[in-house]
Image (cartoon, coloured by chain):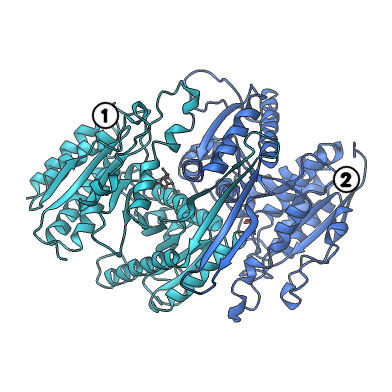
Chain colours: A blue, B cyan
Amino acid sequence: MNKSDQQWRVAVMPGDGIGPEVMAATCRALESLPNLELELEELPWPSHDWHRDQDEMMPADWRDKLSGYDALLLGALGDPGPVTDPNRYYLPDGVSLQPLLEIRKGLDLWACERPAVPMVGAPQYLADPRALETDLLVIRENSEGEYVDQGGRLGVGSERETATQLEVFTRTATRRIIRHAFDRAEQRRRDRQRGLRPLKSFPYGAEQSAQASASVCVVTKRNAVRYSGELWCDVFAEVAADYPHIHTQHELVDACCMKMVTQPWAFDVVVASNLHGDILTDLAAVLAGGMGVAPSANLNPDDREVPPLFEPTHGSAPDIAGSDRAHPAAMLLTAATMLEWMGESDDAAAEAAALLRKAVADDLAEKGMSGRSCTQVGEEIAQRLANTH
Amino acid sequence: MNKSDQQWRVAVMPGDGIGPEVMAATCRALESLPNLELELEELPWPSHDWHRDQDEMMPADWRDKLSGYDALLLGALGDPGPVTDPNRYYLPDGVSLQPLLEIRKGLDLWACERPAVPMVGAPQYLADPRALETDLLVIRENSEGEYVDQGGRLGVGSERETATQLEVFTRTATRRIIRHAFDRAEQRRRDRQRGLRPLKSFPYGAEQSAQASASVCVVTKRNAVRYSGELWCDVFAEVAADYPHIHTQHELVDACCMKMVTQPWAFDVVVASNLHGDILTDLAAVLAGGMGVAPSANLNPDDREVPPLFEPTHGSAPDIAGSDRAHPAAMLLTAATMLEWMGESDDAAAEAAALLRKAVADDLAEKGMSGRSCTQVGEEIAQRLANTH
Ligand SMILES: CC(C)[C@H](C(=O)O)[C@@H](O)C(=O)O
Ligand SMILES: CC(C)[C@H](C(=O)O)[C@@H](O)C(=O)O
């Protein structure tokens, strides 16, 4: 279905903490984009007031309500609640974040995409200047694995207490995520050949000239957590056979985390399980300049009728919430990611995505990340966009 | 039992790849230490020749054989075997590394300790100069959790294939590792008060003056992997109550990995499960200057009769094995860690540990890590030690 010249209905969920601030700045910017038919509808849930009514983090019919939209844009989740109540110790991350996992699983948004491309103007944590050449994309399995939430605690508090957690990996979900990673690598290869993306060659750093201009690295812990690791490696080898132009790599998760810091430029597409992906995407965010500039997309690549969920990788930062001090870059880049997704079937959206991404990059490069209020940054990006048309 | 003035019998296991080279340089240095009664006995297994006889990675009576020693010193494990044989795809990490996990579990070496203190002369990966103030110790649970190796693959190769991995966490093992982390923090606190370790105060960076001079950070993924996460948090709170002078922190594993890169100086002791610890110790190694300088100890802190296993965190680096190019710093620092452990009950060993550590640090600071052969570094360190007495 081609959505070109169509109106896009977006559910805007500001969420908790700094969510409402960065979302307001982002909506301000989105509204100044030309030629784009975006209908932004604000939904009051997941709510930053969850602790006043904690049995209902979301309405019972949340799935029906959300399914009507073309895309979901989320600010941030996580509310520490009244910190003086010791019973609420687990609540901030254990309860107020549940809607995130529920939406991902409930809508079967099985692919999570988090790119790492260093932004000039954002903090640079790595000493090696080659880190600036990093251009990687982590594809995280978003529907099963370590996150199935199966298990329990036997004999709570007793000497014999034993907690179990079951990890479940199906061939079906493993194959679709690995295939998606190869599809993305194939896109990157084509973009590189057309000069739309800086050229890289793999095996990276090899003395021979480039064999391939894209690579997929599969991450496992097969030397210690072997059943899932072997399934992933088997499926990876099968899928790879269908993509002869893509270079392949394997890394153990511990070594991969290390290399993300010591030589991030040697990666292209990285595909990993839910938990490994969770960890690797946080490290990828650091490479790009930290959580302040890290966008994220949760998609169902098989079914464009399922509304994807776009959210910054950062949390709700309750310590600075309400002070208008959060920088909205990650939220703005998340919105640009959403527009890029729309742009796959709508030229106006593709154009808007490019405008917004450039406005954010220029703003960061010129003004850096400190010294301005969240509102001001939103305002200045909106002005910049208004001046470009 | 006080071992002072006693002889220490050490099983030396060079292992695979660069193991024999770095071990030879290290034994050379150990032998030039004064006043120390060390008997180094080389054992031919775990063997770098595993693929010639792969059903026997270790003798059947390995436990009896190893139990007689005071300590085990291992070079490196992991042999890629003949890389042309596709059936050996899993073998390098899946088979040749098994003895490592078998020894850890079989001897109940339930605590793995990996410090991160930046070494002058080793690579510095982080841009922020405060990274040089890092002084952290990761304590990894070494006996259960994600590494119990329970599970399997149902319907291998079929559409319905499902791989399961069970994680098992007992209160007993969780408590002993958390208690050990607090004991180490208590030691660090005392050392800081006596000026033996650079002072830090926690909560780190707080505006008030120091509340505590040591801290333990517990790492979980309780917001998504909740049964184990809740058990760890409950036990952590119980144990912490016995250590009122130690500051406490909690980090989710993804955020902890990120902070290890963005603000490593804010940690002191970090305690984590087997897999989380595996990942965090690789990142800790990066902070210290990379795998080339990262020692590690596997201990049973409850029972000094069980021989601890000391090994560098690095692998066998088959690509440079045999070329005398590996730098032996990690192996030398691992030997120093072994001597420190002996030094808890033997003054001569404690003194030797300090001498060796200083010789390695001075050598690195003066000469850096490149340009010399492994043999030459071993020789120069030995000379340096000979000149100090
Ligand atoms: C909040 C938490 C459950 C979530 C996750 O683990 O997926 C977050 O860390 C993320 O990466 O989006
Ligand atoms: C070789 C492997 C099984 C091992 C582990 O995961 O424990 C290694 O990565 C380590 O950290 O010592």
- The residue lying at 80 percent from left, 46 percent from top is A387
From the image, tell me which residue sits under label 1: B324
Residue B128: x and y in percent read 45, 52
Residue nearer the viewer, A142 or B191: A142
Q: In this view, does A362 lie to the left or right of A31?
A: left
In the rendered image of this protein, does residue B253 appear above or below residue A33? below
Which label sits on residue B180? none
Could you give the CA–CA distance between mark 2 and mark 1, rounded to whole angstroms? Answer: 63 Å
Residue B92: which quarter of the image?
top left
Dot 1: chain letter: B
Residue nearer the viewer, A151 or B72: A151
Q: Is mark 2 on a helix, strand or loop?
A: loop
Residue B103: x and y in percent read 34, 48
* Mark 2 neighbour density, 10 Å: few (under 14) some (14–19) many (20 or more): many
Q: Can residue A121 be seen in this view?
A: no
The amino acid type of the residue labelled 2 equals Leu
Q: How many marks do you count on the picture? A: 2
Q: Is residue B187 left or right of residue A42?
A: left
In the rendered image of this protein, does residue B200 appear above or below residue A86? above
| Ligand 1 occupies quarter | bottom right
Dot 2: chain letter: A
Residue B77: x and y in percent read 35, 38
C-beta proximity under 8 Å, tags 2 and 1: no
Q: Residue at the right extreme?
A: A6
Which label sits on residue A36? 2
- The residue lying at 31 percent from left, 59 percent from top is B300
Quadrant housing the N terminus of chain B: bottom left
In the rendered image of this protein, does residue B41 appear above or below residue A88? above
The amino acid type of the residue labelled 1 equals Asp
Residue B142: which quarter of the image?
bottom left
Closer to the observer: label 2 or label 1?
1
